[in-house]
Image (cartoon, grey):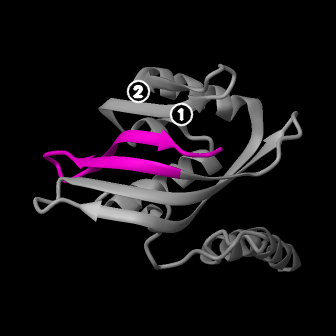
Amino acid sequence: MKNLFRIYVKKILLIYPLYLLIISGCINPFAPPLTDKEVNINLIITEQKTPDEVLTNFSYAYSFKDSLIYSDLLDSSFLFISKNYATNPVTDLTWGRDTDIKTTVGLFRHFQSLNLVWGSTIFEYMDSLKVNAELKKTFQLTLIGSDNIPTINGEAYFLFIKNKSGIWKIKLWEDLAI
């Protein structure tokens, strides 16, 4: 009888911890709690249903150095315009979508972090058909990396177009920073 009792106790001692593990649902006390609420990634990346949403994605792309998000901001006919201060007299520096994406990827690789903050809106216009929009905004760009580059404060002019899917893209970006 004593032998039978010992076997019974051993089985309980072996099975009980396993039973507790099963009914506890494998809870990890060090893991953050799960939520019943659906996580919405669109809180960060927008659907680009407005020009402002395009600029939100623009900031996201710079902050997370995400070239895929960045490339999705630009229309196929995209044009970038800036000033070339290395020439005398100062000339316009212009390039298209492919060059801009390559340049931006190089920027992303060169710096450890980038922080783009859009400031005030200086000018805003949308045509009556709501397929073209113009926007002039201030910005602050902080580049952290191997070079000691001061924060860039400037203005940018954008021309946006809405495609047939209702998605806004940047057709023209003129960097007005001095």
Residue at image point 82% right, 71% down: 10
Rendered view: 166 above or below 100: below
Q: Which residues are magenta?
A: 156-178
Looking at the picture, which amino acid does disc 1 mark? Ser
Q: Nearer the viewer, residue 53 or 43?
A: 53
x and y, in percent, of residue 119 in the image: 57, 66
Left or right, residue 18 beside residue 118: right
In terms of secondary structure, what is the magenta stretch mainly? strand
Q: Residues within 10 Å of mark 2 (few under 14, many from 20)?
A: some
x and y, in percent, of residue 37 in the image: 46, 78
Rendered view: 137 above or below 74: below
Q: Quadrant of residue 145?
A: top right
- Quadrant in the picture for the C terminus: top right
| 142 part of magenta stretch | no
Q: Nearer the viewer, residue 32 or 5?
A: 32
Residue at image point 43% right, 41% down: 173
Describe the element under mark 2 as helix, strand or loop: helix
Looking at the picture, which amino acid does disc 2 mark? Arg
Identify the residue under disc 1. Answer: 82
Residue 87 visible:
yes
Q: Nearer the viewer, residue 71 or 6?
A: 71
Residue at image point 41% right, 27% down: 97
Identify the residue under disc 2. Answer: 97
